[in-house]
Amino acid sequence: MHLCVVSSKECWQDGSGAWYSYGGFPLQMQAITALFDAATLIVVRSTPRDGGMPLPGHARVVALPEPPGTGWKRKLAVGAALPHYAAVMARHMRDADAVHVPLPGDLSLVGLVTALTMGKRCVARYGGSWTANSETTVMNRMTRVCMRTAARGKHVMLATGDPNEPADHGVQWLFASVVSRDELAPPASLARGLSSSPQLACLGRLSPEKGVIHLVRAMARLASRQTGTLPQLTIIGDGPARAALEREARNAGSATIRFVGQLPRTQVIPLLRRMDLCVQPSLSESLCKAWLDAMAQGLPVISSDVGAARTVFGRPGERGWIVPPGDPDRLADVIHDVITTPIDWPALRARCLDYARTRTVDAWARHIAELCAARWGCRVLNGRLAW
């Protein structure tokens, strides 16, 4: 079987011609394309950046030019070039048995509509917050309407969230993960307690909706209290908000925050294993991959009350703690309480790892394969979909 993927994700080539991207995209593409005999990835060409990971070597990559501008200027550019984009996508979809579309994204939405118009089997996967919030855009709403309308017959429509929730108009829930079995923390590393200078980590794209500014402000509030040893925060990732975040940290006089930028995954995992606690203050989320990255290394998480956070972390202290989004004062209070209250850290770390073990990227791909096989009337044979 042949899969065609259409994504708005930025990708680039190195000097040898190999294709790279960043975040969880390369690992998820490796997992989902492995379910098929052949794959074509239609992506957006961009300039190289730090921390890239290779796209699947067995997949053919077709690069679209990156639409100019941002916001509505970019949307207008996509609209102006819509016939060209749709024609390129249709040409490569023609011989595909199925089309996979990671959403949201403007070119991804064009890909979904093109595939539906051509009568192709579609596997669409929405990775943002399915529940409307302050960060929801008109494009997000249009995408969800399209997915709900298509969620029948031969199409598999998936939204990232709690798999135990009932389907939304046929759109089924799916967890998100890029954790491989090889990355799970060895049990021996769980035996440690809290470091004498508690080590906090925050990881992900540095963009406004991730709410990292509230974590920076919470760290400033902790420093102003001057009670005991201050925690040290390592921010892993890059993005458009980085300069403003670094400026905020400097203005607060905080020497307890360091920015390490975008790192390859081979460096992120060892770094997480030296941390005590992960803090993810997002304003909008579904089921954050960074939650599972942290828990796979035995790190409990302090998270904003967004998406599936309540299900993932359970009762307070079971696998983490929940705080209101956008509230640096409350976030500072919870961080202080966690690092000053006696906790059985080895037991807590073990609970986090046990949860992550059931939600690896291998299990994620296997679940997608089972849903597709049931909808398409095929089978999963030796890890691949087959007629």
Image (cartoon, rainbow, N blue to C red):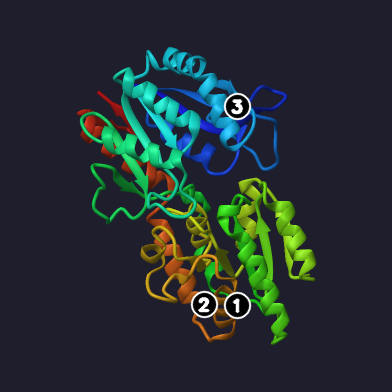
Disc with the residue nearer the chain's start (1 vs 2): 1
Left or right: 248, with 113 as reference point: right
Query: Of the numbered discs in the image, which one, if any, rests on residue 104?
Result: none
- Residue in the foreground of this view, choosing between 385 and 133: 133
Label 2 sits on a secondary structure element that is helix
**Sequence-wise first label, 3 or 1:** 3
Task: Read off the residue under disc 1.
Answer: 194
Q: Whole-percent x and y of residue 283?
A: 51, 58
Q: Can residue 38 be seen by looking at this rendering?
A: yes
Q: CA distance from mark 3 to mark 1?
A: 47 Å
Q: Position of residue 62 (x, y in %)?
A: 54, 20
On the image, the x and y values in percent for residue 126 come to 40, 42
Q: Residue at x 54, y 78 (%)?
A: 334
Of 151 and 339, nearer the camera is 151
Q: Which residue lies under the disc numbered 3? A: 67
- Callout 1–callout 2 Cβ contact below 8 Å: yes
The amino acid pointed to by label 1 is Leu
The secondary element bearing badge 3 is classed as: loop
Residue type, label 3: Pro
Check disc 2 and report the residue beneath it. 345
As drawn, 216 above or below 97 = below
The image quadrant that residue 70 belongs to is: top right
